[in-house]
Amino acid sequence: MSEGDSVGESVHGKPSVVYRFFTRLGQIYQSWLDKSTPYTAVRWVVTLGLSFIYMIRVYLLQGWYIVTYALGIYHLNLFIAFLSPKVDPSLMEDSDDGPSLPTKQNEEFRPFIRRLPEFKFWHAATKGILVAMVCTFFDAFNVPVFWPILVMYFIMLFCITMKRQIKHMIKYRYIPFTHGKRRYRGKDDAGKAFAS
């Protein structure tokens, strides 16, 4: 490999200005993401605000319905991944009727772990809204469609998908939300449980 053949390197072996710029930009972006991690409610309020601005923009422009439909399908897909367990119980199921409790010493109870964690769900949903917003600035994405059909199709798709997900949750007895589950405080509580 000759000098300067590596990605992002200039002729003299030092990183190029463009490479350093985008590396630094990526570091700043990651830093802001890291700082926003503990502020769940604020992050979702900002995302809902962006979503509201996007909806107002689409309403005022009276177009880009296919982009909005694609955004809705993308958000539905993210939501289903958020509600689904990381390891699908139907794939782990033996020939018996359902999942069983641990029977061996080396088996252990596994808590509900999401296929798509909340932070990644928020991040992907926000990026999706921003991409859709950018698409509304280009007339090429303004495909003329009869929007009531898209709305009806989305509602039908949402209902069918959620019905299937709820049946899956009931069949394999998992709840993707922590509201109402028992929590233990620690030493000062002496092991008393309380419902949240």
Image (spheres, rainbow, N blue to C red):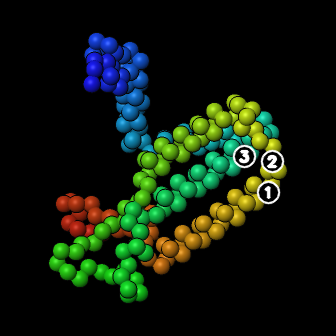
Rendering quarter of residue 61: top right
Q: Which residue is mark 2?
A: 145
Residue extending farthest left: 105
Is 17 displayed left or right of 124 in the figure? left
Q: Is residue 122 left or right of residue 137?
A: left
Say whether disc 1 or disc 3 marks the residue closer to the N-terminus: 3
Q: Image check: 163 left or right of 91? A: right
From what the image shows, is residue 147 above or below residue 99? above
Residue at x-position 63% and y-position 33%: 134
**In the rendered image, which residue does mark 1 sit on?**
149
At label 1, the amino acid type is Ile
Closest to the observer: 69 or 15?
Answer: 15
Q: Amino acid at mark 2?
A: Val
Locate residue 188: give its quadrant. bottom left
Which residue reaches farthest bottom?
96
Q: Look at the numbered discs 2 and 3 and tell me whether their residues touch, using CB distance below 8 Å.
A: yes
Residue neighbourhood size for the residue with mark 3, other residues' Cα within 10 Å, grouped as few (<14), some (14–19), many (≥20) = some
Q: Which quadrant does the N terminus fall into?
A: top left
Q: In the orientation shown, which residue stands out farthest toward the front? A: 1
Answer whether labels 1 and 2 touch (C-beta < 8 Å). Answer: yes
Residue lying furthest top in this view? 12
On the image, the x and y values in percent for residue 62 come to 80, 39
In the rendered image, which residue does mark 3 sit on?
A: 66
How far apart, in angstroms, are the residues tagged by discs 1 and 3? Answer: 11 Å
Where residue 190 appears, as percent x and y from the top left, is 20, 66
Circle 2 SS class: loop
Q: Report, in whole angstroms, how far the alpha carbon at label 2 lies from the one at label 3.
A: 7 Å
Mark 2 or mark 3, earlier in chain: 3
